[in-house]
Image (tube, rainbow, N blue to C red):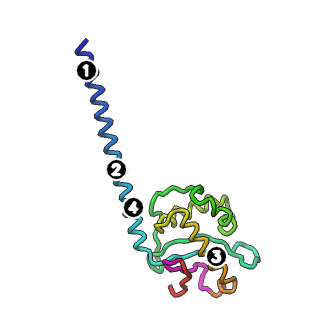
């Protein structure tokens, strides 16, 4: 009987030690992955030279017939980072912005949220901004372009409007 309890105790102790070792290794990897993501975010942010706000014609003849396509950081005049981290997308993080987003950043081919999710993952995660700040800054940039008017947009070489790191229009980029 004592030998049976000894073996059972050894098995339980071995299981507990193994579980602890697996947990600590997983935690260490999680901490390292988090640190790697933070370092990558900082690196990406340091590599940003400017932003482009891309707008699209919305198919109407309104006073300002454009909508947001996206805002992305630029490494230089022709290259931009993409899919910089696996940060989650959650509209709860920017609920107060939803009415404006639906108004100026809508998707003609499906749910607005799917379009925003794709833009967040592809471009927003490379900005170093939080999700709420990314969408807020995108709306602010769009409003600055809208304030310039349709005639001003027509004078631009493309519908990709350059912005500086301060999120001010910078047509000299």
Relative image position of residue 8 (x, y in whole percent)? 28, 21
Query: Which image quarter: residue 145?
Result: bottom right
User: Which residue is at the front of the view, 77 or 41?
Assistant: 41
Q: Specify the label residue 143 is tagged with.
A: 3
Local crowd at mark 3 within 10 Å, few (<14), some, or many (≥20)?
few
In percent of the image, x 24 and y 19: which residue is there? 6
In percent of the image, x 44 and y 74: which residue is there? 48
Horizontal side of 110 relative to 94 (left or right) equals right
Distance from Cα at disc 3 to Cα at disc 4: 31 Å
Q: For mark 3, give the secondary structure.
A: helix
Horizontal side of 122 relative to 142 (left or right) equals left
Decide which of tag 3 and tag 1 comes sooner along the chain. 1
Relative image position of residue 61 (x, y in whole percent)? 76, 77
| Residue with the mark numbered 4 | 38
Distance from Cα at disc 1 to Cα at disc 2: 33 Å
Decide which of tag 2 and tag 4 comes sooner along the chain. 2
Judge whether residue 158 is colored magenta.
yes
**Which residue range is magenta in the image?**
156-166
Q: Specify the label residue 7 is tagged with.
A: 1
């Amino acid at each position: 009987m004592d030998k049976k309890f000894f073996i059972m105790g050894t098995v339980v102790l071995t299981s507990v030690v193994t579980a602890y070792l697996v947990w600590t290794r997983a935690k260490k990897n999680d901490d390292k992955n988090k640190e790697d993501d933070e370092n990558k975010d900082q690196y990406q942010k340091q590599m940003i030279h400017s932003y482009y706000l891309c707008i699209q014609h919305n198919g109407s003849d309104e006073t300002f017939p454009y909508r947001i396509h996206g805002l992305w950081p630029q490494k230089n005049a022709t290259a931009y980072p993409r899919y910089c981290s696996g940060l989650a997308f959650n509209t709860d993080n920017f609920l107060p912005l939803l009415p404006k987003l639906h108004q100026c950043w809508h998707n003609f081919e499906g749910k607005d949220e799917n379009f925003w999710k794709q833009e967040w993952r592809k471009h927003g995660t490379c900005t170093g901004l939080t999700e709420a700040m990314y969408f807020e800054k995108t709306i602010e940039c769009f409003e600055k372009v809208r304030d310039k008017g349709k005639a001003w947009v027509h004078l631009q070489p493309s519908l990709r409007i350059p912005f500086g790191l301060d999120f001010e229009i910078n047509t000299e980029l």
